[in-house]
Image (cartoon, rainbow, N blue to C red):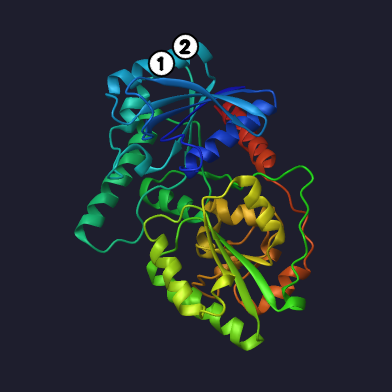
Amino acid sequence: MNILFICGSLEPGRDGVGDYTRRLAAALINMGHIAGVVSLNDSKSDITPVNNKEYQEQDGAKVPVLRLNKHLPWKQKEVAVQQMMTEYKPDWISLQYVPYSFNSKGCPVMLGYRLSRLTKSAKWHIMIHEPFLGKTNSFKEKFIQYLQILSVKQLFSQLKPLSVHTSLSHYANMVKQSTGKEIKLLGLFGNVPMEADYKKESGNGKQTGIYKAVFFGSAPKKEDWSSIADKLKIFIEDNKVKVELYIAGRLGPLGDGFCNFLEEKLYTKDTVSLFHVLGGVELDDLSKLFSNCDFGISRVPARLLGKSGTAISMLEHGLPLWIAVHEGKDDDRFLHFGKNLCFFNLSDLEKAKDYKPEFGSRLNIIGKHFLQDLQDSTSRN
């Protein structure tokens, strides 16, 4: 099968959907298929205003990519993409959709029309990573939500996709209620590759009195900071232990505030050496960190766990995952992959550690699921 993926940006390590798309394309190439990726709105400064073709290495494969600067006029982008389609002759075009990837205000209402002009021969697939704003309060948010829903409707009407996926049942329900469109679920895989001989070291916090915990990814919402810190503090005081906390990755605009808050709330000058802000970490080093920690900390509640590549990476590595933002008693109904490794209360950590997972990357499983759904969609139509 020959598949061309379209996403917003392909700057490695700086765009979650771009990293996801590159890994999926690499997995398909390693399975013997043909795959390439186009980024329509790349913002990396060293990309010239003209098209930039290159190969990006991922998981042992060289993925052909076309990176188009966000400042390039659409007519020039259209010509460049059509040239790549002529070269690769894709059977399928897979749009990896996030509204803010294609429009800075999150309202790409013209995207469906523009993409529909690219080809009349290839079949369309859409992966909706994020559809539109959920609960809104202000008039501005309601207006943005309206335009985002319109953008999704336009994609459906203009592209007439034979297959549509999303990663969360929550998102599938949102799309169905707003558009009437039934869409399938396609799980995510982690964004931290594992070595073939990866081994999960047993955490020994209970024996040493020092539990190693890792937080990886963007800083959580500010309203969740107190809850995370308070629960950690109660665990430390009730069990008379210490928590050696590693904060890794690019935390985003709230990062400094989040780190300062946790350090001030949890640690005295005598124990500040147990607080490590690592910043950007090489993926191999991150994988090793996962292997040596007692538990990871999820930045999202259970209902969004299925869209968190960082949380899924920890579970793929066999790392118990503390879901620190607990929204209610029904949260566990959203847990699927790695359920026995997930826990809401730090007091349940030892139960999660007692479970011996068959850990491993979900990449090939998801890739095969993706291909099968495309084949099924073709046979139905």
Kindly check if marks 1 and 2 are in contact, taking CB atoms under 8 A apart as contact. Answer: yes
Residue kind at label 2, given as amino acid type: Thr
In depth, the one of 158 and 71 nearer the eye is 71
Choose between 84 and 275: the one closer to the eye. 275
Query: Residue 229 at x, y = what percent?
Result: 49, 76
**Horizontal side, residue 98 vs residue 378: left or right:** left
Q: Amino acid at mark 1?
A: Gln
Picture coordinates of residue 309 (x, y %)?
56, 50
Answer yes or no: is residue 119 visible.
no
**In percent of the image, x 29 and y 25: which residue is there?**
72
Question: Image height check: is 171 above or below 271?
Answer: above
Up the image or down, 346 lies above or below 168; here it is: below
Q: Secondary structure at mark 2?
A: helix
In the displayed orientation, state which residue is furthest to the left: 139
Q: Position of residue 24 (x, y in %)?
A: 59, 35
Residue at image mark 1: 82
Picture quarter containing residue 350? Answer: bottom right
SS for callout 1: helix
Circle 2: is it few (<14), some (14-19), or many (20+) Cα within 10 Å? few
- As drawn, 379 above or below 258: above
Mark seen at residue 269 = none
For the point 65% across and 34% down, the residue is 59
Residue 351: percent from the left, percent from the top? 73, 74
- At x 36%, y 41%, the residue is 152
* Identity of the residue drawn at 61% across and 77% down: 345
Which quadrant of the figure contains the C terminus? top right
Q: What residue would you read off at disc 2?
A: 86
